[in-house]
Image: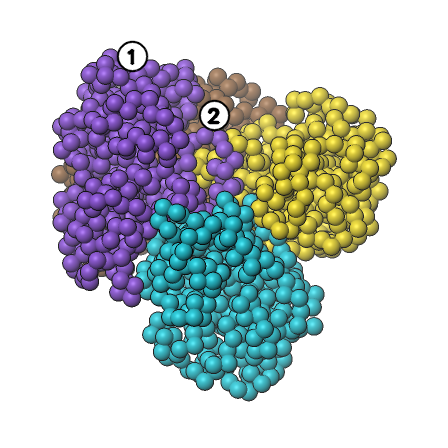
Chain colours: A cyan, B yellow, C brown, D purple
Amino acid sequence: MIKVGIIGATGYAGAELVRLLLQREDVEIVWYGSRSYVGQDFASVYRNVVHLTDEPCKDDDMATLAEIADVIFTATPQGFCASQVTEEILSKTKIIDLSADFRIKDVNVYEKWYKISHATPQFIPEAVYGLPEINRDKIKNARLIANPGCYPTCSFLSVYPMVKEGLVDPNTLIIDAKSGTSGAGRSAKVDSLYCEVNESMKPYGVATHRHTPEIEEQLSYAAGKPVTISFTPHLVPMNRGILATAYATLTRPVTTEEVKAVYDKYYGNEYFVRVLKPGEVPQTRWVEGSNFADVAFKIDERTNRIVMMGAIDNMVKGAAGQAMQNMNLLFGLPENTGLKQIPVFP
Amino acid sequence: MIKVGIIGATGYAGAELVRLLLQREDVEIVWYGSRSYVGQDFASVYRNVVHLTDEPCKDDDMATLAEIADVIFTATPQGFCASQVTEEILSKTKIIDLSADFRIKDVNVYEKWYKISHATPQFIPEAVYGLPEINRDKIKNARLIANPGCYPTCSFLSVYPMVKEGLVDPNTLIIDAKSGTSGAGRSAKVDSLYCEVNESMKPYGVATHRHTPEIEEQLSYAAGKPVTISFTPHLVPMNRGILATAYATLTRPVTTEEVKAVYDKYYGNEYFVRVLKPGEVPQTRWVEGSNFADVAFKIDERTNRIVMMGAIDNMVKGAAGQAMQNMNLLFGLPENTGLKQIPVFP
Amino acid sequence: MIKVGIIGATGYAGAELVRLLLQREDVEIVWYGSRSYVGQDFASVYRNVVHLTDEPCKDDDMATLAEIADVIFTATPQGFCASQVTEEILSKTKIIDLSADFRIKDVNVYEKWYKISHATPQFIPEAVYGLPEINRDKIKNARLIANPGCYPTCSFLSVYPMVKEGLVDPNTLIIDAKSGTSGAGRSAKVDSLYCEVNESMKPYGVATHRHTPEIEEQLSYAAGKPVTISFTPHLVPMNRGILATAYATLTRPVTTEEVKAVYDKYYGNEYFVRVLKPGEVPQTRWVEGSNFADVAFKIDERTNRIVMMGAIDNMVKGAAGQAMQNMNLLFGLPENTGLKQIPVFP
Amino acid sequence: MIKVGIIGATGYAGAELVRLLLQREDVEIVWYGSRSYVGQDFASVYRNVVHLTDEPCKDDDMATLAEIADVIFTATPQGFCASQVTEEILSKTKIIDLSADFRIKDVNVYEKWYKISHATPQFIPEAVYGLPEINRDKIKNARLIANPGCYPTCSFLSVYPMVKEGLVDPNTLIIDAKSGTSGAGRSAKVDSLYCEVNESMKPYGVATHRHTPEIEEQLSYAAGKPVTISFTPHLVPMNRGILATAYATLTRPVTTEEVKAVYDKYYGNEYFVRVLKPGEVPQTRWVEGSNFADVAFKIDERTNRIVMMGAIDNMVKGAAGQAMQNMNLLFGLPENTGLKQIPVFP
């Protein structure tokens, strides 16, 4: 039985962790952390689990939690995990951090884009970027996993094979991403009200979104050189789902068959990444509620560009599902344990 | 391994059966029946199961299917199952019919409300109404199960304890129900277009909806006398979910504690029916994607009425999930096998 | 030129007043009142009017406003208008109050349901309930108009002819109403977040909603005797629109033609109330953005009941549009001046 | 009184024309053309105009219509208008064609992208591309106006000033556009069903969408040289609204003030194009139901690119509203006659 603690359990990502973990027979949630709801039953806050758990929410206390949990998930605001983690904690338990605190290796880049100072930069070097499709082996032995952002997961998986193979010029990359509203979290803001979001669409964080350097860093590793991209997220009136549409200039003429083979080379053995048939496009509805990432591409001879597209559920592959995928790796389990949910449609 | 055939697999209810059955290790789907998509891969029609099955759709052929399947689900238009079922088929396999063909014992009532003639009324007597919460034992030994309608399931479960205990006058019952749009099915009609449904709400089938006699029949058994009710369904701009709001006059003064105890008496041991705490109301979001039915009530002393409320996912407890619950009973399995999905939120 | 002041201009109802009033050539908005946004341009808060007004928001100050405005709209929380109105103000200007402060004649009923004490009960007697279809003449000469609630407007117009004619027993009335989310207002609450409302439906205020006594009072005048009803509102995932479904027992057998004639008797000359043809049902999409109220009915011989249905746009006929209709009456203008907007579809 | 005929009145764009035209006192609709609903009352098909018109739908007959109408709107499938127009008709009336038949000057380009042959290429040279903001003077004297596509209107207005001034390299333009579902029309297709569109998002027509050459042609005129772009439309779960996000490489360093001045140079006097303040982004909700186009930009120094953004209501500025704007020009009326509707929010 894996003993799990969740800090930030009453945010949307935390609650999604609860949904996924509670369905497992080999996991016990020993701590529902929630600063806002201390003492209240978790099931009174998220009534989807009425009758399935009667645990109350507890305050954040990573040190105590480290004594009883085999792994701690932090689904918390930026800066929290960095401010709490210590060598002692890491010596006793594993941490999977769903915030951005340990995703970026260059602390200056982190501090510039996130506009906070990093409390424990000494742990950055050992943190492993938790994208199993590229870092599987490192993840297995990590103490501290930086669970990737939702946009970076979708964006990176969509373009990675082409960048890695040098078939596109990475500095021509333009990623136009669209997300459902759960990504904005559960805090009570006018901008997140139903009537403000419904029947509307908008870009936000144009040229300044904090997921940009995260995508760039991972692409730089793939390209073997620094990469600078344009990245624009948009808010879409739906609960879940991210769609990324990425454009890049080809470095040489390619055929559809050739590109399909490249995608299959990287993802053919991946359970969660589904390369669609040429001519098909990803749609968020076909991945909703699941850990799948659907990717596809279209070559545009007229412009010598390729359009690369991907779709994920931002709450699952973009957050809680990927975190559990990382947990599976940490504990030597099959990567898709507890993650075989088929997308819910309609 | 239970061998399952689905006729009508490419409708929404059929596809939901596929979603639920494919996630099981003890079930094999041996037949994806679809008149419209014969020869096409099922996963090309419902791309949520891309990479999870490569089976093609086959034509409807219940006789052949009876040879190879332990159980056949018919998720087909009214009249189809009745027109196909034979004694020979029933001697070889089990049938769980998601249509209304065998739900109503009085064939005249069926023919009047459905405006079709029943091809095989001889099988009506043996058919068991597949609501496990009231017919569990009969279901276990049935050959032919009439899977309840979505509105009847939600309506009946909401009011059953009060009617059974004689605490309301059943002939004062007014059930105002609201459904997501998946209940309208996947056929291409102008009325079901996104732009026609979105940002709107309407009643339909006022005083004439075909689920009315089904609800009345089951309530009559509970009341021990004929029951006539008002039932009005409404179309709501959401994919899934039914909410029923039922009103009835109390036969004597009751307290909240007393009524809560009545609901607990009938549902306290039911896995899928969750009686909410007094003061709480059912919301479809807390059952979405799951087989749960959440029920609650509110006594209105001013009018001497009680308001009884229930919420289900019309595709799960209202169709495919309940059908699988019935299948579990047929095969001697724990009733919630494969049905422990926690509702997806948000 | 009618000089208009709006207190509470940055709530949804206030902003809808701005939308309707700004389109008029014979009206000038002299005061955009908003406690939350004092000093900010109104068009920076509601960007639909960018370039159409450059007025800033001003603090609430009814006394100053009374000096310069011919009419004041208060789109404010319960209690505000009552706390501000004075004889002096009423001697200088007209007030159209969109809150409930002056809707209910019995101050004890008001205080019981609204759980606040009324600051100026002395003005209740002279306040006119601003439903033009029944109080047109009184409205013309009023100083203080109590603009009806959204649910009461829709509910009352749907059932009024049948109650007035004595064709239904008013104490059997059950009104099941459904509203879009704009009715919840623009305050930042978790319950109003997009992800909480979208893809879900719920009842609220069951047997306790504050619009109940307002409906009952108006129905009592129509019936000529006290009326007690069941009223349940529901929250629906759409921005605008209220649908009311009302059930009542007939006092004698009636035909469809007869009932149609009754509705036509009361509404045949009304511009804003559209009696649909028998067989048609109201849908909120056909009134969205307009001041129309569509009403229809269906006789149910089986239960000796009639189902009466109505649809309005809660922001227009349910709030700002009706307020402007009242303003037109106050100033001797054709009632539909500035209110001929055709519903926006889709 | 301007006599207007509409062919294709029961499609979404046609019905939007009816909404806008029926609100005018100086216009009479003399012909509600609809092949599908001949003989039925228009108001029974689009019930938003119940009680506002009792005209029946008539068959398509442009020759007869030319005798009685001052202007004919064709809101019809590609190829229809081209197949009907004759010199005789053009000598008697004006035509505003909402289809693509006369938008593209090079008939080969038209036939290649639309995959139909053009019936009357002889009228292409005289047709005027009906984007008033660039072709106002030509429109006034035209007989045949090609009303622009929805995506081209939004895309072009967003980038035009920068292209015209040579501040971006037009061949680096990537336009990622997102549209509500009304753009897909009212035909009954599975892909347009509520449950297929709701809670999902997808790209379509990737690298092959037929609006691409229309955008390219207009940009070529602005740039003074051939332009080839990447254009990807996406389907968004909302009724109305298009958002375009366009990316291009700057030809030289620019400041925000400088670019703002450029946009103001072109749009400062335009009633319908609203240049937002730097830092603001367009949102479809702020233009819904109106003829406004909101545009904005953001310079990205890191990549030497500029992001240009625009939002319109696809049914109004993207179709019927712009058509009426063109009609106003044709008849010497102020361009915004009947088009001052303020966007409906929420």
Residue D136, given in percent of the width and then of the height, sits at: 16, 35
Q: Which of D173 and A319 lies nearest the eye of the viewer?
A: D173
Disc 1 with disc 2 on a shared chain:
no
Q: In the image, D257: left or right of A191?
A: left
Callout 2: SS: loop
The amino acid on which the numbered mark 1 sits, given as a three-letter code, is Thr
Q: Residue at x 36, y 46 (%)?
A: A302
Q: Which residue is mark 1?
A: D64
Kindly identify which chain the residue marked by label 2 belongs to.
C
Residue B135, given in percent of the width and then of the height, sits at: 78, 43
Local crowd size for mark 2, using a 10 Å CA cut-off: few (<14), some (14–19), many (≥20): some
Q: Is residue C107 visible to the viewer in this orientation of the structure?
A: no
Local crowd size for mark 1, using a 10 Å CA cut-off: few (<14), some (14–19), many (≥20): few
Asked if disc 1 and disc 2 are in contact, CB closer than 8 Å, the reply is no
The amino acid on which the numbered mark 2 sits, given as a three-letter code, is Glu
Q: Which of A266 and D313 lies nearest the eye of the viewer?
A: A266
Q: Residue at x 36, y 78 (%)?
A: A108
Q: Residue at x 70, y 48 (%)?
A: B21
Q: Which residue is mark 2?
A: C280
